[in-house]
Image (cartoon, coloured by chain):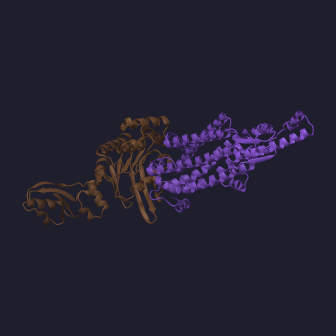
Chain colours: A brown, B purple
């Protein structure tokens, strides 16, 4: 398990990370989300030892992460980077050896990954000759070629076409499920995070504002929104229900303390009820609620 | 993984990728051709034979004068074409009109053109002197054989003292040029390699696996080994060609000069490479390294100019002072060594001064590199970079 504990990072007077803590268990995918400038990249760079923190610690399997542990991490930086003139396979072999692999093992693994990434025919070409999509595949290979114990990926899905997104998603899931690797990645694509991840950590302004199992988070945030379909003769029936407001269409939000049964009663009085039930919020809605000011959270559309 | 292994891996990659690169191959070929060209040129220069000169002899006994002048032509590196003239006036006219370079009348009058080849006038004077002596001896009643014997004494034994510095100067010139070009070229490789890694952001992946100091050391060592190999290959080829042509005098100090040059390439390259690495790390784009490497390039150009002024004057005060000045010494010391003018103690002290300079620049350069290699954005000024290097943490 990877643990970030009370990480603090300051740039002059600006607090980039404010006692940020969360953990990534073995075999789990954790989505790291937050608006731009929330501190995601800063936190990941501290994990990778590229940036010194001003407080807190990073633990891997209960011990402070050091150089040898970091070499066992697969890392994809926010801004992609490879040696443009270096050939595909040689690049993967080099990066793998730099992380401690023996030459023969590195060559075998690089060959396997080039195959798996569908780049076998381009394996002897300089990376700069490849299309952007293929370069991103090599970048993924660079993060995975040394069979890392842990994956830390900064915006791995950004810029991928739908096929690339599916491919990367399947690779990450198999790394976590089959090899038991903890995976943490940042993303702005919340539907994707919701679909792939076991849990999320939501940061804003350097602080953790929500974290945990995606299903539990949704359940916790459920209970205030209801999907209700009524064949009402008077479409303004909802206005008569105190503490209830239409979000959009058939989605209704109740203020805290309002009994859902009162909503149902009012609906039945207005006409036959076709559908009634609690609506679980999407991750995007939880995100908006947690990050944006609560009053603003009710305005936007999904 | 040990630090040594990390450094070796980085160095290995640098060598492999540079060997494959067009820039390195092209520069190697250009330098090889250049050095072979200089050596061949020097050989041809030395081999173009005696200078031609036309001399008009006139008057009674002019035949003897002509023979006597002809016998001297080789020692003055001249090849004479002798003509006769009917009168002294005709001989002078021939010189005045440019048909001849000089005239010699048996009465002892020499007319010489302004643009006559060097050595012609001394040759004619010697010829005249011999003719005078000859007739004086004959007048005293010596036989023709006795006169000939008196005028051709057995050659003196010649003991040469000191080195022949002529070949030494050519060697110093070529060596200094190679060192200058080598340090500048391979220094730029370091700077542009650093910027390439920084600009493409691959440095972030690399530095999550190895320390900045290891990456820097591997890069500087790898590129330096390549530079040393190139220098040795070029120097070796130059010497082989010179020996094969046989006409360039390699001074006695050739072996020592090549050794000293190799040592000072390593020292000078290391000294400057620290600076070039820092110059690369403080910018993010290739376009910007021209300005940050400019101080280093200027220091090298100045060193080169000083080294050129030391050619033929290897014991000057300037040469002796700059021998102990780290930025300049790498180009001065080999030039002095080639001209056989370097006492051993000066060599030792110079190496010590270089080592001290390298230690200083290594610490400074590495600190600037470590503090700036992960920074993005606008280039730093030198002052900002130095402030970063001094600050307690990056």
Q: Position of residue A133 (x, y in %)?
A: 34, 44
Q: Is residue A26 above or below residue A273?
A: above
B354 horizontally vs A230: left or right: right
Q: Position of residue B300 (x, y in %)?
A: 60, 53
User: From where the camera sits, is residue B53 visible?
Assistant: yes
Residue at the far right in the pictured view: B141
Residue at the far left in the pictured view: A233
Residue at image coords 77%, 45%: B122
A103 horizontally vs A277: left or right: right
A52 horizontally vs A262: left or right: right
- In depth, the one of B202 and A281 nearer the eye is B202
- In depth, the one of B229 and B383 nearer the eye is B229
Q: Position of residue A263 (x, y in %)?
A: 15, 61
Q: Is residue A269 above or below residue B202?
A: below
Q: Position of residue A215 (x, y in %)?
A: 28, 51
- In depth, the one of B82 and A14 nearer the eye is B82
Quadrant that contains the C terminus of chain A? bottom left
Q: Quadrant of residue A35?
A: bottom left
Residue at image coords 18%, 63%: A245
The tally of labels here is 0
User: From where the camera sits, is residue A62 visible?
Assistant: no
């Amino acid at each position: 398990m990877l643990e970030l504990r009370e990480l603090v990072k300051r740039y002059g007077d600006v607090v980039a990370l404010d006692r940020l803590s969360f953990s990534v268990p073995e075999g789990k995918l954790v989505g790291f989300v937050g608006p731009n400038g929330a501190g995601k990249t800063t936190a990941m760079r501290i994990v990778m030892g590229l940036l010194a923190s001003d407080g807190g610690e990073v633990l891997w399997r209960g011990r402070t992460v050091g150089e040898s542990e970091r070499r066992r991490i697969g890392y994809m930086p926010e801004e992609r980077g490879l040696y443009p003139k270096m050939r595909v396979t040689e690049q993967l072999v080099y990066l793998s050896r730099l992380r401690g692999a023996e030459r023969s093992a590195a060559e075998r693994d690089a060959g396997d990954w080039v195959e798996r990434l569908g780049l076998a025919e381009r394996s002897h070409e300089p990376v700069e000759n490849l299309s952007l999509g293929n370069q991103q595949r090599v970048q993924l290979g660079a993060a995975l070629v040394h069979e890392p114990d842990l994956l830390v990926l900064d915006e791995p899905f950004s810029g991928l076409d739908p096929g690339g997104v599916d491919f990367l998603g399947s690779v990450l899931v198999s790394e976590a499920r089959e090899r038991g690797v903890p995976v943490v990645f940042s993303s702005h694509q919340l539907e994707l995070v919701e679909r792939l991840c076991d849990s999320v950590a939501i940061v804003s302004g350097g602080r953790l504002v929500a974290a945990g199992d995606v299903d539990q988070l949704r359940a916790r945030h459920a209970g205030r929104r209801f999907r209700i379909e009524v064949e009402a003769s008077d479409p303004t029936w909802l206005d008569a229900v105190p503490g209830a407001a239409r979000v959009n269409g058939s989605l209704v939000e109740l203020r805290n303390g309002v009994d859902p049964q009162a909503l149902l009663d009012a609906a039945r009085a207005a006409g036959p009820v076709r559908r009634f039930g609690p609506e679980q919020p999407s991750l995007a809605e939880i995100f908006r609620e947690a990050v944006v000011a609560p009053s603003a959270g009710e305005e936007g559309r999904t | 993984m040990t630090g040594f292994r990390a450094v070796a891996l980085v160095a290995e990659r640098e060598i492999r990728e540079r060997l494959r690169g067009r820039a390195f191959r092209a520069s190697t070929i250009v330098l090889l051709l250049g050095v072979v060209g200089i050596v061949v040129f020097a050989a041809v220069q030395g081999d173009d034979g005696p200078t031609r000169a036309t001399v008009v002899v006139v008057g009674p006994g002019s035949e003897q004068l002509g023979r006597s002048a002809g016998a001297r032509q080789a020692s003055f590196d001249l090849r004479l074409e002798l003509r006769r003239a009917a009168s002294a006036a005709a001989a002078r006219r021939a010189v005045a009109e440019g048909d001849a370079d000089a005239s010699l009348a048996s009465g002892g009058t020499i007319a010489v053109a302004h643009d006559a080849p060097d050595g012609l006038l001394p040759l004619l004077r010697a010829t005249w002197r011999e003719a005078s002596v000859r007739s004086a001896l004959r007048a005293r009643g010596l036989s023709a054989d006795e006169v000939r014997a008196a005028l051709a004494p057995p050659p003196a034994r010649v003991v040469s003292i000191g080195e022949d510095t002529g070949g030494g100067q050519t060697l110093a010139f070529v060596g200094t040029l190679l060192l200058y070009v080598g340090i500048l070229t391979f220094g730029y490789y370091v700077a542009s390699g650093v910027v390439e890694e920084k600009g493409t952001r691959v440095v972030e992946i690399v530095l999550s696996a190895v320390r900045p100091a290891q990456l820097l050391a591997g890069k500087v060592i790898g590129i330096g080994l390549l530079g040393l190999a190139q220098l040795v290959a070029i120097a070796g080829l130059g010497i082989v060609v010179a020996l094969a042509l046989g006409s360039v005098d390699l001074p006695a100090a050739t072996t020592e000069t090549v050794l000293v040059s190799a040592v000072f390439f390593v020292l000078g390259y290391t000294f400057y490479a620290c600076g070039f690495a820092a110059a690369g790390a403080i910018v993010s784009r290739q376009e910007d390294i021209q300005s940050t490497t400019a101080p280093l390039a200027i220091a090298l150009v100045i060193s080169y100019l000083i080294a050129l002024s030391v050619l033929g004057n290897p014991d000057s005060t300037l040469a002796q002072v700059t021998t102990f000045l780290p930025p300049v010494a790498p180009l001065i010391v080999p030039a002095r060594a080639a001209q056989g003018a370097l006492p051993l103690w000066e060599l030792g002290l110079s190496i010590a001064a270089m080592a001290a300079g390298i230690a200083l620049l290594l610490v400074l350069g590495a600190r600037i590199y470590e503090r700036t290699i992960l920074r993005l954005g606008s280039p730093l000024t030198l002052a900002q970079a130095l402030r970063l290097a001094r600050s307690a943490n990056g």
